[in-house]
Amino acid sequence: MLAYLLRRLGQSALVLLAVSLIAFMVFRHIGDPTISLLGEDATLEERAALNTELGFDKPVPLQYLNYVGKVVQGDLGISYRLKRPVSEVIAERLPATLELALMASLGALVIGVVLGVYTALRSEGWLSRAVMTGSLVGVSLPTFLIGIGLIYLFAVELRWLPSFGRGSTVKVGGWETGLLTASGWSAIILPAITLGFYNMTLIMRLVRAEMLEVLRSDYIRFGRARGLREKDLYFGHALRNTLIPVITIAGLQIGALIAFSIVTETVFQWPGVGLLFISSIQGVDVPLIAAYLMFIALLYVVINLLVDFLYLAVDPRLRRR
Amino acid sequence: MSDVIPSPAPPRRGWRQSDSPVKRAFARSRTVQVASAVLLLIVLATLFAPLLAWQNPFDSGALELNDAFLPPWSEGINGAFYALGADDQGRDVASAILYGLRMSVLVGVSAVLLSLCIGIPLGLVAGYAGGWFDTLLMRVADVQLTFPVILVAMLILGIVRGVVPEGVREQVAVLVIILAIALSDWVQYARTVRGAVMVEKQKDYVLAAQLIGRSRTAILGRHILPNLLAPILVIAAISFAHAIVAESTLSYLGVGLPPTQPSLGTLIRIGQSFLFSGEWWILLFPSLVLLALALSVNLVGDWLRDALNPKLQ
């Protein structure tokens, strides 16, 4: 078991190393920071001074080590566009994205499990068929079309919900939250549905398949023979056994949600890191692009590791390997 | 009763053997018939876009500003007919959609072809030769598969934008987006082909080819590759759907095709700004066409995967 964990840790470190190398190459070789930071008409001396300050006059391997050293300490450079430290800008935008991803995955989990159980228990009903067809259509559509459709229906036609921004926010410590105000809640509904839709269908299909499988198994039949009530059988015994893979998938998908929030945040002008990333690609803000890349890589690696550990904690059979 | 056993039809060579089950599956599924009809219509529309559109929507001299914001099914001041309305610059929405659809399909097809050209040779060599090349390729694939395709494409876009000088960015936008999508998608082909090659190379026909001294290139290209066409075809169909969605998403986000040579995604991006002012047709019609395209390609791809899967027959 120790060997397995060590190997997984080693793999994660390797992934991070590879991504940091790419991020460094992006950071170092694309664009000219002396032009981006000082402007077109800086003198040669000023440029040389900045080059020295950024350490660009040293050998490249040394620069890479310096870069990694700084990243580890949280220093991600200075944004070319905003002229502020990248780590500061990202920290400012992160709460919006995390709240959105959290609401989206919670919503996807709850609705997905409910619909999955329903379509499994009433697999021949017309409502189940409608739900399954709808999910098939929804999965093949681009996310932004779903978002635009929701805006058209709920913001333009019905005028129930706002179509952009995150409403009024409250600062709790260093965390700017929209979840304490009514306008914040009404603003998060549409983006959360848009972002969570794909995951919802994924979870629904998974729960449905697992439920159908479990309902055929021997212990459910014995439970029935023992005279257990249908409700206890479905929710106490069947559903519980389907939840482990569901939680794994939901957990693994959080990283993807944060990456995909780029699209949702653009549709709804949600002020999170995804919108920041898109504007930095449009403006070729290299330090921000590199930093976002590192951030997503770290997130993915940590989530994957956590899920592995979770498996070990949940399933004793794995510990014997 | 005669005791003459009818001799079975001689088996046809290669992947053609799967012809008839596929045809039968096609005849059974109403959904795939409709989807392929839509797809055929779209392909014809993209091929004949310049003939079908009465206006070249991207020649600013041909536009009539007085016709701006005309609603669908109305006549312009010069007697031109706007079946799907006109946008803010008096551009015929129907013509813009035809040209935009053309761009979306062009980018999708080229991206798939390019990632085929990258992924298949790499997968063939990795699967046949093994060794350090195989290990390296699979580690690279693992790392890349950790991240969503759209993110990888966006990163490549960001890098290329940084390398290409600002003046020519619009001119190379089509090439850049094709490259970005292809480079984020080749892993699928490489992995599948590698896996299939590792199975195929154990078989007797490969041994026979080796014994008669055929070169490695000939064994890979002439003997093994033809046996891999079915799985490759399935991935190509599904990744064509992904490429269409990826391209429209990137263009919608404003990092794909510019408004001077728009795809459906760009048109939707432009149309969204008129959503609140009541000119719904500028947004609705491109969205519907993209919906039809994405849905039909997905349905045909899924159907093909099931039809070519011998386990399901």
Image (spheres, grey):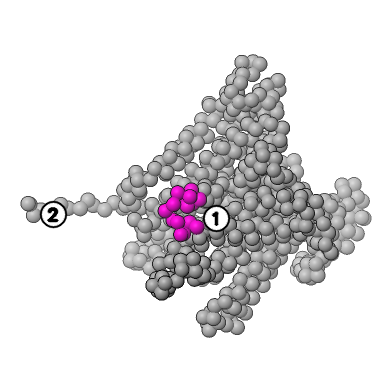
Q: What residue is pinned by disc 1?
A: A201
Q: Is residue B180 above or below residue B36?
A: below
Find the magenta span and give its range.
A118-133
**Looking at the image, which residue is at 60% across and 63% down?**
A250
Whether discs 1 and 2 lie on one chain: the answer is no
**x and y percent of residue A118 in the render?**
50, 57
> Is residue A124 magenta-colored?
yes
Most frequent secondary structure within the magenta stretch? helix
The residue under label 2 is which amino acid type? Ile
**x and y percent of residue B146 in the render?**
60, 63
**Looking at the image, which residue is at 60% across and 55% down?**
B149
Instruction: Mark 1: give few (<14), some (14-19) or many (20+) Cα within 10 Å.
Output: many
Residue B164 appearing in the image: no
The residue under label 1 is which amino acid type? Thr
Residue B107 appearing in the image: yes
Left or right of B187? Residue B21 is left
Q: What residue is pinned by disc 2?
A: B5
**Looking at the image, which residue is at 58% across and 54% down?**
A198
Q: Residue furthest left?
A: B1
